Each structure stands twice: as structure tokens, then as C-alpha cells.
Image: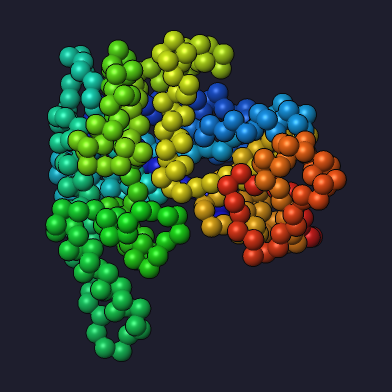
């Protein structure tokens, strides 16, 4: 169950800073290129590292300098205009691209710049309402095309129709379809599977980027909870960013980035915070591998079994899975690697039914 194709679509009105943010992602991607020689990244896709302090600790234990963090892919989607659900602007292309992503990242403009025309954008609350209206109208159009099942069809078709009615009712009450599912868990229930099958846009989990001015960043970071109240969303899904600062940071060396962030009173860049929120939103988790060649975090969905996790490393590993040698990160560090763990009997051998836990340090045994 590889998550290499999991992606977050960056959505917003023209001139809200979406392109500046995405360009910062692309610059970061160029800097990462040497670490990801096998990654084929499309021109409209950028990657961001998920911060993970555990990797440097493991690297020191096993004696390697090669560290490969988990990453999240972001897809740049054409700027929205009002009427997109009816094909205005690049409406059809815009909606098609969102359907291909796993989550939506709304970029909302909260900076003031007389040199950057708003092009339809007004204020974050109104902009989010407009975007959601377009997505809901598009979903209603999709649902209107569905046909009520008649006698003689499988029971699943009637169950699907019942869900379609629930979806319509939710949208007609100006609520996203995701509202029906409660918190997104990563493991889809029946309704979520039907929504995914129908490519419904408002069933996707959402992230909210508030793009603020350089001089306003420190103050606005303190207002994250207030932004949550204004937008009516969970503050944990909000990332306050100055896209202009991110663009400047992205071209600096690692040491200069740390110095710059330190001057701003920050420990992580906005892109790192965005990647972490995206990881959380998609309910992903990491397992870790640590050897002399490299230390690496591998991305999986919560609930992934050991053979499926092995398949993330190489597809043949899932098919030929024998067992997994597993230790917790804490134990691995305390006993300084596999040999120390073996001496105290803390190496676990897990079979095909084992469900991977966040931070498992793993070696897979596979047949030929």
C-alpha cells in the first residue's frame, strides 16, 4: 500500500500567493534532488520534507551520513474563479485536477500589497466560502447524474443510493460531505469509499494556509486559534505562512535557513509545518529503516500491515514477505542498535498480520 502517490492539491484564487508558495516548494525540491534520485516529479508537483528529529539520532547510532525524511507531494492547481463549477475560467480543468488529489490545501490571502491585485479575492472567510460553494455545486452536479437503482440489482447499489441521498442533503444544507464522516481516520468506512468512487470533492480532508505579510508573521502565528474560529475549522488544520519568506528561505543553505528562522523566533519553516499538518491530515505515519547505507522514514497509512509496509520499499517485498524484525525507536536508541537489542531480547519478530506502529524501526526478511 504505497503512499508515494498521495498528494495535496493547492487551491486558491489568483494572486493569493499560491504560486509563490508553490515556487518555494519547487526550490526546496531542487535542493532535495540529490537525496531522491529515483523520484519522478511532474512539473506541477513539488515535495516537502516532514520534519523528523529521530532520523539524525538513528544515523549517529548506525554510522551513516545519508538521511532521507518522509515527504508529502503538493500539486499546483490552476487558480479558481467564481463560476468554476459551471466551467468558468479553467473551471473544468481545475475541478478535474482536484479530483485526483487526496486532500485540499486552501491558500487564503491575509496580506496587504497594493502592487498585487486581488483578482476576485476579498477576505479569507469570504474566499473560503466562495471556493467551498464552487466545490459543493460541482459535487451536486455529479450526484444529479446518478440513477436510482430499480429491482433486481445488488443490495450494495441500494446502499450506495442511500448514501447519495445523504450526500445531497448535506450539500443542500451548505455542509461539506466530509461532515458526515466525523474525523478522518485514514481507514475509509462505507460512505467514504462511495464518496471516493464518485470523486466527490467536498469529501476530501482539508488544510488551510493563511498567507500573511513578512512583518505580520510573528503576530499572526499567535492568532491561529482565532483564525480557526473565524473560518469555523480546526486550528490544527491551519498553517500561518508568509509565502514571501518561504521563497527567500528555500534558496538558502541549511545553516543559513536555521539562522534566518532563529531571527524570526521560529524552529521550523512554514513549508515544514505545512508538510507536518498534511501528514497528520492524511493520517499517515512513518516506519524507519536504519543501516550503514542510509537512515530513512517511509510513509504508510495508519493501519498498514507489515507486508504492505514492506511493499512500500519494493513491490516484490510484499509478495515475498517472510517476517519483520521490529523494535521501538526508544528501545533502538537505548540499546544502540540491533546487536544491543538482541542481547537484551528486545527484538520482535512479527508476521503477516502485524499492524505497523508509528516509529517502528524495521528490517524485513523476504524470500525470492
- Colour convention of the picture: rainbow
Where's the N terminus, which quadrant? bottom right
Q: Which of these two is toward me, 238 or 122?
A: 238
- Residue 17 locus on image (x, y percent): 29, 25
- Residue 243 locus on image (x, y percent): 35, 22
Seen in the picture, residue 153 relative to 267 is either above or below; the reply is below
Q: Is residue 81 left or right of residue 290?
A: left
Q: Which of these two is toward me, 317 or 97?
A: 317
- Looking at the image, can residue 113 be seen? yes
For the point 71% across and 36% down, the residue is 333
Q: Which of these two is toward me, 87 or 348?
A: 348
For the point 24% across and 53% down, the residue is 176
Where's the C terminus, which quadrant? bottom right
Seen in the picture, residue 223 relative to 181 is either above or below; the reply is above
- Looking at the image, can residue 99 be seen? no
Residue furthest to the bottom in view is 152
For the point 38% across and 53% down, the residue is 184
Residue furthest to the front in view is 344
- Residue 259 locus on image (x, y percent): 51, 11
- Residue 105 locus on image (x, y percent): 34, 39
Count of number-bearing discs: 0
Seen in the picture, residue 56 relative to 313 is either above or below; the reply is above
Seen in the picture, residue 150 relative to 5 is either above or below; the reply is below
Q: Which of these two is toward me, 263 or 7?
A: 263
Q: Is residue 86 left or right of residue 39?
A: left
For the point 17% across and 42% down, the residue is 129
Amino acid at each position: 500500500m504505497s503512499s508515494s502517490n498521495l498528494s495535496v492539491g493547492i487551491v486558491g484564487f489568483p494572486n493569493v500567493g499560491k504560486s509563490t508558495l508553490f515556487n518555494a516548494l519547487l526550490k526546496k525540491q531542487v535542493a532535495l534532488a540529490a537525496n531522491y534520485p529515483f523520484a519522478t516529479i511532474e512539473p506541477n508537483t513539488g515535495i516537502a520534507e516532514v520534519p523528523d528529529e529521530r532520523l539524525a539520532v538513528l544515523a549517529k547510532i548506525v554510522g551513516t551520513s545519508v538521511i532521507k525524511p518522509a515527504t508529502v507531494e503538493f500539486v499546483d492547481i490552476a487558480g479558481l474563479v467564481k463560476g468554476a463549477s459551471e466551467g468558468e475560467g479553467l473551471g473544468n480543468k481545475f475541478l478535474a485536477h482536484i479530483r485526483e488529489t487526496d486532500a485540499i490545501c486552501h491558500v487564503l490571502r491575509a496580506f496587504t500589497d497594493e502592487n498585487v491585485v486581488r483578482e476576485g479575492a476579498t477576505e479569507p472567510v469570504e474566499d473560503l466560502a466562495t471556493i467551498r460553494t464552487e466545490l459543493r455545486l460541482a459535487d451536486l452536479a455529479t450526484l444529479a447524474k446518478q440513477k436510482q437503482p430499480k429491482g433486481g440489482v445488488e443490495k450494495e447499489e441500494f446502499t450506495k443510493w442511500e448514501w447519495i441521498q445523504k450526500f445531497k442533503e448535506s450539500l443542500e444544507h451548505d455542509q461539506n460531505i466530509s461532515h458526515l464522516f466525523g474525523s478522518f481516520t485514514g481507514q475509509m468506512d462505507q460512505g467514504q469509499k462511495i464518496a471516493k468512487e464518485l470523486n466527490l470533492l467536498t469529501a476530501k480532508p482539508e488544510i488551510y494556509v493563511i498567507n500573511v505579510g513578512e512583518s505580520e508573521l510573528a503576530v499572526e502565528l499567535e492568532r491561529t486559534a482565532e483564525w480557526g474560529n473565524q473560518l469555523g475549522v480546526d486550528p490544527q488544520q491551519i498553517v500561518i505562512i508568509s509565502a514571501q519568506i518561504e521563497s527567500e528561505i528555500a534558496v538558502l543553505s541549511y545553516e543559513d535557513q536555521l539562522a534566518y528562522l532563529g531571527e524570526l523566533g521560529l524552529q521550523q519553516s512554514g513549508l515544514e509545518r505545512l508538510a507536518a499538518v498534511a501528514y497528520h491530515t492524511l493520517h499517515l505515519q512513518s516506519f524507519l529503516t536504519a543501516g550503514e547505507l542510509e537512515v530513512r522514514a517511509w510513509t504508510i497509512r495508519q493501519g498498514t500491515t507489515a507486508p504492505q509496509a514492506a511493499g512500500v520499499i519494493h513491490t516484490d517485498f510484499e509478495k515475498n514477505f517472510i517476517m519483520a524484525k521490529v523494535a521501538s525507536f526508544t528501545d533502538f536508541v537505548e540499546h544502540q542498535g540491533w546487536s544491543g537489542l538482541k542481547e537484551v531480547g528486545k527484538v520482535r519478530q512479527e508476521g503477516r498480520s502485524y499492524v505497523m506502529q508509528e516509529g517502528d524501526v524495521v528490517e524485513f526478511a523476504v524470500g525470492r
